[in-house]
Amino acid sequence: MSSERIQKASVVGSIVTALLASLCCIGPVVFAILGISGAAFVQKFEVYRPLFIALAVVFLGTSFYFTYRKKPAEECAPGSYCADPRSDKINKIFLWLATVLVAFFIFFPAIISRITG
């Protein structure tokens, strides 16, 4: 698997696991807003929250490693996507957006508890 694919997969994986980590807290709020009752089943995910948070952090760490490491010149063929400097900038933008999204999902329970008092 190429480093580009690993980097992209780890960004997606970090977002998914962060969403799963906050599902126990976001789920009931979303269902309440939608007017759906009986959404207590998502609170079963609370037990797995630390595992999902750890996985999200590992995925983000992997993404940062593959995004910011010094790439060998022979890794990118001339004219390929990874040889274009704009692709590196785009990858960094998406990585930082994913990091902010993951942080929001991870800290959502604390944010919502502050808001609701």
Image (cartoon, grey):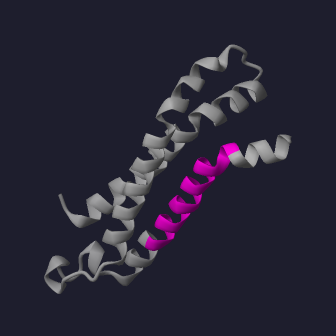
Whether residue 32 is situated above or below residue 67 in the rendered picture: above
Tell me which secondary structure the magenta stretch mostly adopts: helix
Whether residue 58 is situated above or below residue 36 in the rendered picture: below
Whether residue 25 is situated above or below residue 2 in the rendered picture: above
At 68% from the left and 13% from the top, the residue drawn is 38
Instruction: State the residue in front, 103 or 49.
Output: 49
Can residue 101 be found in the magenta stretch? yes
Q: Position of residue 110 (x, y in %)?
A: 70, 47
Q: Position of residue 105 (x, y in %)?
A: 60, 48
Can residue 84 be found in the magenta stretch? no
In the picture as drawn, the residue positioned furthest to the top comes out as 38
In the picture as drawn, the residue positioned furthest to the right comes out as 117
Residue 83, located in which quarter of the rendered image?
Answer: bottom left
Instruction: State the residue in front, 84 or 25.
Output: 25
Of the 4 image quadrants, the one containing the N terminus is: bottom left
Q: Position of residue 99 (x, y in %)?
A: 52, 61
Residue 58, located in which quarter of the rendered image?
Answer: bottom left
Q: Position of residue 117 (x, y in %)?
A: 86, 42
At 36% from the left and 77% from the top, the residue drawn is 68
Residue 64, located in which quarter of the rendered image?
Answer: bottom left
Question: Is 19 on the left-hand or right-hand side of 115?
Answer: left
Highlighted magenta segment, given as a residue range: 92-109
Instruction: State the residue in front, 106 or 33.
Output: 106
At 64% from the left and 30% from the top, the residue drawn is 27
